Image (cartoon, helix red, strand yellow):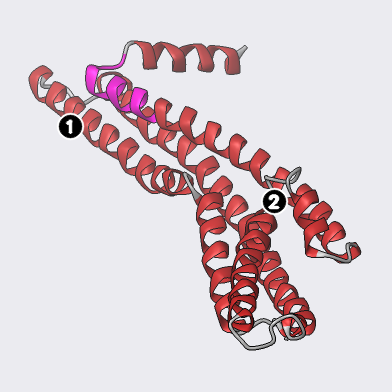
Amino acid sequence: MQPVQFHQNLVSMIINSGPMAKGVIIILFIFSIISWAIMAEKYRQIKRAQRQNRKFIHVFRSSGKFSMVSSASSKLKNSPLVGLFQAGLNELNHQIRASYDKIQQQTNPVTELHKARLQNINSINRALLRASSFEVNKLERSLNFLATTAAVSPFLGLFGTIWGIMKSFWGIGLLGSANLSVVAPGISEALITTAVGLIVAIPAVIGYNFLLNKIKILSSEMDDFSLEFLTVSERNFT
């Protein structure tokens, strides 16, 4: 029965705590709800990205033409690799069209059109880097809130504790007594905010590190795909 009584007393202390402690607990509660919502949504987003990345890589390596890959990628919008592929393909097409236009200005363009080639591989590399940066930023969006929650929550809880302890000592001064029965309730109430702060901060830290590690893996996959796309482009269009 003691654990039940402790939980009941804990809830009672939260309900009967002062305005400052309640305010801190409410803020921490809001931080916790938002943090868990972000972690759940980001986890689903990353799982979709991982699943569709595998499908896209299979299509990219098994298809003989970029046009076939482009057609299949329309069903894999949640894959970051699709964004890289489209950025690289747009730059590639731009250079091929520019090469065609240059050839058409020559004296005998019909026999020379087959010579239209990729002009600058570095431009495609830069397009892939920009697309990779955009996709990583999209995956990392809202993670800053988790980092902020992990860093700020313990200090918010500590602020509530310090305020509560100050309040307890003020009460001791008014009553002129410092025995345990006078001090214990106020100190217990004050320490609740620190406990709540840690309860909010610890999952945020774990979630932030877990999600960031998953995003780093996806970023590595994007780097590998960029090199593969450059290799294919250089092999077939130069």
- Between marks 1 and 2 in the image, the one whose residue lies nearer the viewer: 2
**Residue 237 versus residue 111: which sits nearer the camera?**
111
State the image coordinates of residue 10 (x, y, percent, origin top left): 45, 18
Is 12 on the left-hand or right-hand side of 214?
Answer: left
| Up/down of 222 relative to 70, above or below | below
Q: What residue type is labelled 2?
A: Ser
Q: Give the left or right position of residue 159, taking residue 6 as reference.
A: left
Is most of the magenta stretch helix, strand or loop?
Answer: helix
Q: What stretch is highlighted in magenta?
A: 17-28
- Image quadrant holding the C terminus, namely bottom right
Q: Quadrant of residue 57?
A: bottom right
Q: Residue 199 carries which label?
A: none
Residue 132 in the image, given as x and y percentages of width and height: 57, 64
The answer to which of 18 and 62 lies nearer the viewer is 62
Q: Can residue 186 be seen in this view?
A: no
103 and 216: which is toward the camera: 103
Res 79 label:
2
Residue 3's spot in the image, x, y percent? 59, 18
54 drawn magenta: no
Which part of the image, by quadrant, shows the N terminus? Answer: top right
Provide the residue designation for mark 1.
Answer: 166
Q: Which residue is drawn at 48% across and 47% down?
A: 141
Is residue 177 in view? yes
Q: Residue at x 62, y 57 (%)?
A: 215
Q: Earlier in the sequence, mark 1 or mark 2?
A: 2
- CB of mark 1 within 8 Å of CB of mark 2? no
The secondary structure type at the circle numbered 1 is: helix
SS under mark 2: loop
User: Which residue type does callout 1 highlight?
Assistant: Met
How many numbered callouts?
A: 2
- Residue located at (57% from left, 39% from top): 39
